Image (spheres, grey):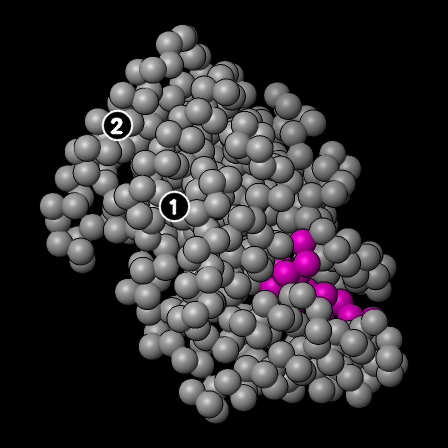
Amino acid sequence: MHRFFIILFLIFTTLATTAMARSVTFLRDAEVERGLDELARPILLAAGLNPSSVKIVLIDDESLNAFVIDGRAIFLHSGLVMRLERPEELQAVIAHEAAHIANGHLTRRVQNFRNSRMISAAALGLAVAAGAAGADPDAAGGFAVGASSSANRVFLAHTRNEESSADRAGIRYMVAAGIDPTANISLLEIFRGQEALSAGRQDPYSRTHPLNSARIRDVKAAVAAYEGRFETTREAQYWFNVVQGKLSAFKRSSRWTLRKVRNQTDNVSTMRRAVAYHLQPDARRAVAEIDKLIAKNPRNPYAHELKGLILHDNRQFNAAAQSYRRAVDLSPNQPLILAGYGRTLLAIDTRDSVRNALSVLEKSRSRDPYNARVLRDLAVAYAKTGQNGMASLATAERYALQGRMRDASVHAKRASDLLPNGSASWQRAMDVLRAASAAEKQRNRG
């Protein structure tokens, strides 16, 4: 059984036995993910971790939280990211979570998690680290996670000793990377007083990261031990502005965004204004703003991608394809940009555009294997080109990724009947069938 479907089996055995199941939405955007990677890279290197092996995953949740499950992903709630005031605070969050990975704090909990049969969240971490997509079809796919809220808190919670160790290590990583460690103090100040609240009123971060006055004093003492002048780099400030600005532009009301960027002409403000007008919707103004950004920096692939999105959503598919094509030229291996281009080519719906869409979408999927939105588009492209077996396979894998294992089984059986027996694609269909069968048996036992 392929590794991915072993992961799916672990997820869905838990779905059958847990008291609650909820959908976790991952926010996917090529530019935001680039920004998070840029901010995390110096921290991860200082921690002795490979930046290409640890994915920073953004969860659509207004509460304040950050956590790790296994060594391949650091999860950040959007509410926390938007609450922070400077790049060093975001890097302090990443440094703290990286310390939990580097210091081996996850080994004990993974064993405990296995023993308690609550492996779904750990499996989620593995799958997301490999590139799982968001839950809203417009945000690129879904992923079901089953676990009771109390059980999640037990698993995710760190001991006070682990927190103290991660605090000290995170500060060392920041200093080694030349990043101001005092951000750890202002970060903790955000959560001061949380432990005095009832559990229902606390932010999740306070429930999973024990915080008290002694810990804050220890952090202040640890920071004071490092003397030196730390300055925010232009690159860090830029990427922080991009991450926070684009996230808030899509999450907040357009009126709020336009008020925030009034009379501001920098690149990030122009991008935010374009998003705000797009959400109103006012396509003319949105395109005018993004054209200003492109005129100032014609080699910015994310500006061309955003223009493509705006045009696509306004059904100007041929113009959108031109913008996406330029974005792909500038960033040929970015899977989310490729996905947008392929989707637009599919919308043009000519014989040539569908054939080209299939090629582009296959390239996107090869770089981001578990993007459910790409799987949906691939299924359409395969069907339009007469490859019904591959269309059924892509649909089966999309349903499996979303936790709809019975639907996945139906389409996987259809795919196995249509695909050449023993081929790689046929084997993938059989993997889905085995995962679905295992999940069904676990449900019956539960």
- The quadrant holding residue 401 is bottom right
| Residue name at image x 50 percent, y 20 percent | 176
- In the image, residue 171 sits, relative to residue 209, either above or below, namely above
Whether 378 is among the magenta residues is: yes
Q: Which of 392 and 223 is in front in this view?
A: 223
Residue interval drawn in magenta: 368-386
Q: How crowded is mark 1: few (under 14 residues within 10 Å), some or many (20 or more)?
A: many
Q: Nearer the viewer, mark 1 or mark 2?
A: 2
Q: Name the residue under label 1.
A: 66
Q: How crowded is mark 2: few (under 14 residues within 10 Å), some or many (20 or more)?
A: some
Q: Which amino acid does label 2 sit on?
A: Asp
| Residue name at image x 44 percent, y 24 percent | 172
Looking at the image, which residue sits at the far bottom?
444
Residue 425 x/y as whole percent:
80, 73
Res. 140 in view: no
Q: Name the residue under label 2.
A: 218
Residue 445 x/y as whole percent:
46, 90
Whether 440 is among the magenta residues is: no
- Where is the N terminus found, in terms of image quarters? bottom right
- In the image, residue 260 sits, relative to residue 25, either above or below, namely above
Is residue 410 left or right of 403 when viewed as pictured?
right
Q: Nearer the viewer, residue 255 or 35?
A: 35
| Residue name at image x 32 percent, y 66 percent | 151
Q: Which of marks 1 and 2 is nearer the N terminus?
A: 1
Task: Check disc 2 and report its element: helix, strand or loop.
Answer: helix
Q: Is the magenta stretch mostly helix, strand or loop?
A: helix
Q: What residue type is labelled 1?
A: Ala
| Residue name at image x 36 percent, y 59 percent | 155
Query: Residue 158: which disc?
Result: none
Residue 69 x/y as whole percent:
46, 54
Is residue 65 left or right of 296 when viewed as pictured?
left
